[in-house]
Amino acid sequence: MSSGTFITFEGPDGAGKTTIIKLIAQELNNVLLTREPGGIEIAEQIRRVILDKGNTAMDSRTEALLYAAARRQHLIEKVKPALDKGRVVLCDRFVDSSLAYQGYARGLGMDEVFTINQFAIEDFMPELTIYFDIEPEVGLKRINKNKGREINRLDLEDLDFHKKVREGYHLLMERFPHRIVRIDASGTVDEVFQKTMQLVEAKLAEKKPSI
């Protein structure tokens, strides 16, 4: 078992998690901030294929498999080595994204997509997952207002798709209640940051050796 701590952050598009994660990383020592899909060159190349707005013909199973492939490479090349060195790894999305987006919203089945990912991650899961919850309408408005944000193929899906993504995340909270913690992401950046920081600090405190 590694001596590091693996914490992932999830949420629908426009929930603001990427902003919060960066703020969290600034407050911690010996931290690695990374993202999925991406984080290392091979996975970033796969990311470009997945999210390219021109790839409208991409089959849902192809999409799920590409995410799993990027996840595998990212995990063995970047995440696990950092954890083995005792670092705190903060990851913007992990397997729960595939379960919510491809498993539930795309209709492939959560169990089926989880099976694909179990092969990729070998049952390796986060110690804590913080889920930023927000109404899809609010999240999409935030995306449209943020001129500097990358607009990708999934952002262009209709409102019903994004509603299903949120439903998927809520099912995951029921399925993994001891790992996934919900945060209301509709508040101000500072409010969400403070709540998130409390959860992260509590998790890190659990791992400190008692004196």
Image (spheres, grey):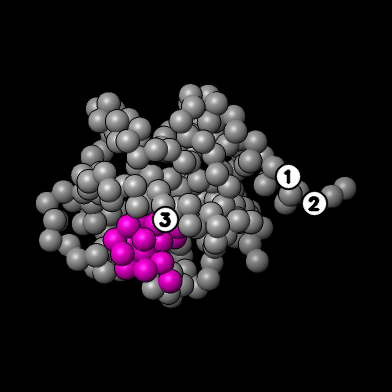
Q: In the image shown, does 25 or 160 lie closer to the viewer?
A: 160
Q: In the image shown, does 179 or 184 lie closer to the viewer?
A: 184
Q: Which mark is residue 205?
A: 1
Question: Which residue in the rendered view is the most extreme toward the right?
Answer: 211
Q: Residue at x 22, y 46 (%)?
A: 158
Disc 2 vs disc 3: which is toward the camera? 3
Q: Is 78 included in the stretch rendered in magenta?
A: no
Q: Residue at x 64, y 56 (%)?
A: 178
Q: Which residue is mark 2?
A: 209
Bin the neighbour count of mark 3 within 10 Å (Cα to Cα): few under 14, some 14-19, many 20 and up.
many
Per the model, the C-alpha gap separating discs 2 and 1 is 9 Å
Q: Which mark is residue 168?
A: 3
Pick whichever of labels 3 and 1 is earlier in the sequence: 3
Residue 97 % position (x, y): 40, 55
Q: How many marks?
A: 3
Which amino acid, mark 1?
Answer: Ala
Q: Which residues are magenta?
A: 95-111
Which amino acid, mark 3?
Answer: Gly
Tell me where residue 94 sits by quadrant: bottom left
Per the model, the C-alpha gap separating discs 2 and 3 is 36 Å
